[in-house]
């Protein structure tokens, strides 16, 4: 009879634990309803952005860094000075705390970047070439 009473005791204890476990899980699996409210123009904008970015995948390349400093105004002045001399070459202002950097060009080879760097020696000092992801310029075969 001791075995039977032990079995009843285990059954009572385990039944109680299953009940508590079941109650806990039932509360955790209650599902809610989420309603997303957004402007329809968001989807249009996302589709246009994808379309505009087709074929502009970044590749490894080179840029010439023409300015580094903490003053934002000086960075944009350096960019404007560069754009006056080379309006067809893209320029980028980058902020990495605490410095602003102005990088110019999208060159596939280091040699092309060095050519621009030599041309810029009249207007800028302390330049160097950076290897980073670039937006490749369109070649004649891309058109």
Image (cartoon, rainbow, N blue to C red):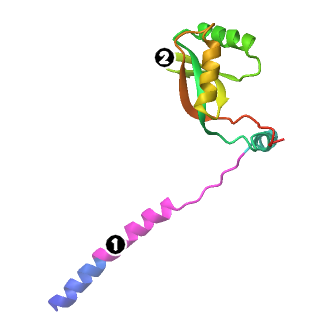
Query: In front here: 93 or 119?
Result: 119
How crowded pointer 2 is (Cα within 10 Å; few <14, some 14-19, many 20+) is rated as few
Q: Residue at x 65, y 54 (%)?
A: 33
Magenta-span inclusion, residue 35: yes
Say above or below: 24 vs 118: below
Residue 73 left/right relative to 23: right
Counting from the top left corner in percent of width and height, residue 13 is at 28, 74
Magenta-span inclusion, residue 126: no
Residue 133 left/right relative to 19: right
Counting from the top left corner in percent of width and height, residue 82 is at 68, 13
Counting from the top left corner in percent of width and height, residue 95 is at 56, 21
Q: Quadrant of residue 124?
A: top right
Q: Residue at x 61, y 16 (%)?
A: 118
Q: Quickly name the residue at label 1.
A: 16
Say above or below: 67 vs 44: above
Q: Report the magenta residues as a range.
A: 13-36
């Amino acid at each position: 009879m001791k075995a039977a009473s032990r079995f009843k005791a285990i059954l009572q204890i385990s039944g109680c634990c299953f009940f508590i476990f079941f109650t806990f899980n039932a509360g955790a699996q209650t599902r809610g309803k989420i309603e997303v409210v957004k402007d329809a123009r968001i989807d249009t904008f996302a589709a246009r952005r994808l379309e505009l970015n087709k074929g502009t995948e970044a590749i490894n390349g080179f840029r010439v860094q023409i300015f580094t400093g903490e003053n934002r105004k000086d960075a944009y002045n350096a960019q404007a000075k560069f754009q006056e001399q080379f309006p067809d070459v893209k320029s980028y202002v980058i902020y990495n705390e605490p410095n602003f950097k102005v990088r110019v060009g999208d060159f596939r080879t280091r040699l092309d970047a060095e050519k621009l760097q030599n041309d810029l020696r009249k207007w800028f000092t302390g330049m160097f070439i950076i290897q980073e992801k670039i937006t490749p310029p369109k070649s004649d075969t891309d058109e």
